[in-house]
Image (cartoon, rainbow, N blue to C red):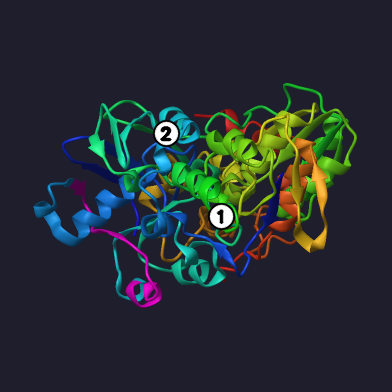
Amino acid sequence: MKGKISFSVKNRHIGFKFDLERNVTIITGDSGTGKTKLINMVRQYSEEGKASGITLKCDKPCIVLDGNNWDVILERTKSSVVFVDESTKFLNEYSFAKAITHTDNYYVLITREPLPQIAYSIDAIKQIIKNDRKPRIEKIYNKLTINDITAAQYDLIIVEDSKSGFQFFKKAAEGLGTQCESANGKSNILSVLEKRSEERILVIADAAALGAEIQRLSRYGALSGKAIDFFLPESFEWLILKSAIFDGNERVRDILKSPVDHIESREYFSWERFFTYLLVEESKNKEKLKYPKGKGKLPSGYLTEKNIDSIMSAMKRK
Amino acid sequence: MLRIYFGNLPDEIYNTEIFYENQYDRNWVMDDFAREVIRVIDDSEVVSPDVIKNDIFGSFPSTELSAGVKTLLLIKNMPNKVFNISNCGDNCAKYLLKLAENRDIKVTLHHAMDFGNDFSVKVINDRRRKVVSDPIEFLMLADHYLRGESIDEG
């Protein structure tokens, strides 16, 4: 499934309306905002249709997944929006994460649990804001990332990646006179932050799969007393594709305008993997820029002064 | 004191909504604590046993309260059970601490709840009985115990 999906559900008392812009959406936040109400309305409509007294508008069928036979139901569910409530036991299980990978559905997961086994974007994490009969559903972390990493001087740059992305930012950091360290994976960023004593730190990570970590990282940033900035492009490969290096590539420009219209969720559960595929494809005939599938060694063409500048400033581009 | 176990326990009540529906007492909503959490968290007023009202939904039974409020009422009235407080948002945190002021309450937690900057809880994973009052230490313990294995898509 691909493309943005508009969803609305209402009864006489209350209505919820939001867009699904990715295959996984997380709804979280305070108690008493209406999460359970939302789920119950979807459940009642899926069981009784219009006779429920609920009006639900969505281009795709909507179901609430629960019960002991969830895996059997999921296997039969195609091209649908699947809601799962926070109190559903299987939601934090590895088997559920495995089962939804390579399926043709979008998922709306209502939970406060980080779900580290599921790769989801920080952009997909939303909360319900009370607003009388029309609660609003808003992104939580849409203003977290900075777009210009040269605007401030850092004592340390921590990069989630240990492969090509790290090679790039290590070289770029040399130019800025800043030390650069790999966290060797997104789940290690917090412990590296905690161990290091530097005052001004920049964290670079892929937003596309950082969803499970971001609540703890941003809370640490608020509590620690250190000045911590986050530079969170979709992925390192997305950043390269967005840079001036690919300005003449119409396919890339078209996809970047609206990735959701191009990324088939069954094939690419995380957008991070799609952008790696796209960069590998689009660079295969470019001398010194042929990007390796396994992201092992970054080709030298990306490490020229001009291309470092292009990639570093890509987040600032519209 | 609140005694927190990060992760699953065999005797935890994970889905507090189902448990509430089958075990609640209609008078639970009548005391001052219940009235306050129902007013502050759910923007609703208690009218009489098991009758709540607000401007949006009119009158409704306590089974329609938020999962967070139901969990607080369960902990208050059945303190010997182990409830999953990840059913509670951060706006329930101060009430959880209040319930555990004068007695030990054991709970499970599956996310890094924000208790603010002024709190003391016990983290009881790995048979430790450590009192934690530092929000960063609490955050790091949550991070340590809630780590999971990610799916390889390939």
Q: Quadrant of the N terminus of chain A?
A: bottom left
Label of residue B38 in the image? 2
Which segment did they paint magenta? A56-73
Q: Same subunit under labels 1 and 2?
A: yes
Vertical position of residue B72 compared to residue A76: above or below: above
Task: Report the residue that reaches farthest toward the left.
Answer: A51
Judge whether residue B15 can be spotted in this image. Answer: yes
**Badge 2 element:** helix
Give the quadrant of residue A309: top right
Q: Nearer the viewer, residue B134 or A170?
A: B134
Give the total number of marks visible in the rendering: 2
Task: Report the residue that reaches farthest toward the right.
Answer: A197
Chain that bears disc 2: B
Amino acid carrying label 1: it is: Asn
Q: Is residue B22 left or right of residue B109?
A: left
Q: Residues within 10 Å of mark 1 (few under 14, many from 20)?
A: many
Judge whether residue A299 can be spotted in this image. Answer: no
Label of residue B84 in the image? 1
Q: Is residue A65 left or right of residue B148?
A: left
Please tell me which residue is depicted at 65% across the width and 60% down the height of the picture.
Answer: B7
Vertical position of residue B33 compared to residue A106: above or below: above
Task: Report the residue that reaches farthest toward the top.
Answer: A151
Q: Is residue A314 left or right of residue B39?
A: right
Q: Is residue B33 magenta?
A: no
